[in-house]
Amino acid sequence: MPWINCQQGALAERVGSQLRLATALRDVRVRDLALRTQGLSPAALDAVPAIVDEARKVQNLSSVTDDGPPADARPCP
């Protein structure tokens, strides 16, 4: 039953995504940055990821995605 494996994979990805978020939010500086974005305009909110991406490049860190499925992931049947 391939759909069971697919559903398990989707669940595992969701759980993994939630764990990565929980781990990131343990850092007070990450929480502070997130809270500072409250009330910003949609345009300003759209600019924040670009600024963070540039900071990651300067520090030679890999890029971070939106925690969605990989681009080459196939949907469940």
Image (tube, grey):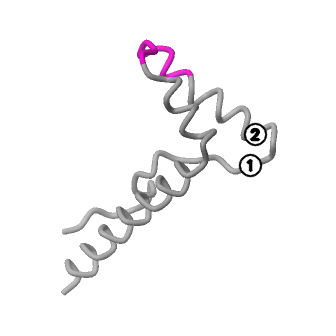
- Magenta region: 39-47
Question: At x 48% / y 21%, what residue is drawn?
Answer: 45
Residue 77 lies left or right of residue 8; in this view the side is left
Q: Is 41 inside the magenta-drawn segment?
A: yes
Q: Nearer the viewer, residue 57 or 2?
A: 57
Using the image, tell me which numbered label, if any, was put on residue 7.
none
Say if the magenta span includes residue 45: yes
Q: Secondary structure at mark 2?
A: helix
Mark 1 crowdedness (10 Å alpha carbons): few <14, some 14-19, many ≥20: few
User: What x and y, as percent, mark residue 49?
Assistant: 57, 31
| Front-most of residues 18 and 67 | 18
Instruction: Residue at 60%, 42% (x, y): give it.
Output: 28
Q: Does 61 sit left or right of 10 as displayed?
A: right
| Amino acid, disc 1 | Leu
Circle 1 residue: 61
Q: Quadrant of the C terminus?
A: bottom left
**For the stretch drawn in magenta, what is the main secondary structure?**
helix
User: Can you identify the residue that label 2 sits on?
Assistant: 57
Residue extending farthest front: 28
Q: Are marks 2 and 1 in contact (CB under 8 Å)?
A: yes
Which residue is at a point 40% across and 58% down the rendered structure image? 18
Q: CA distance from mark 2 to mark 1?
A: 6 Å
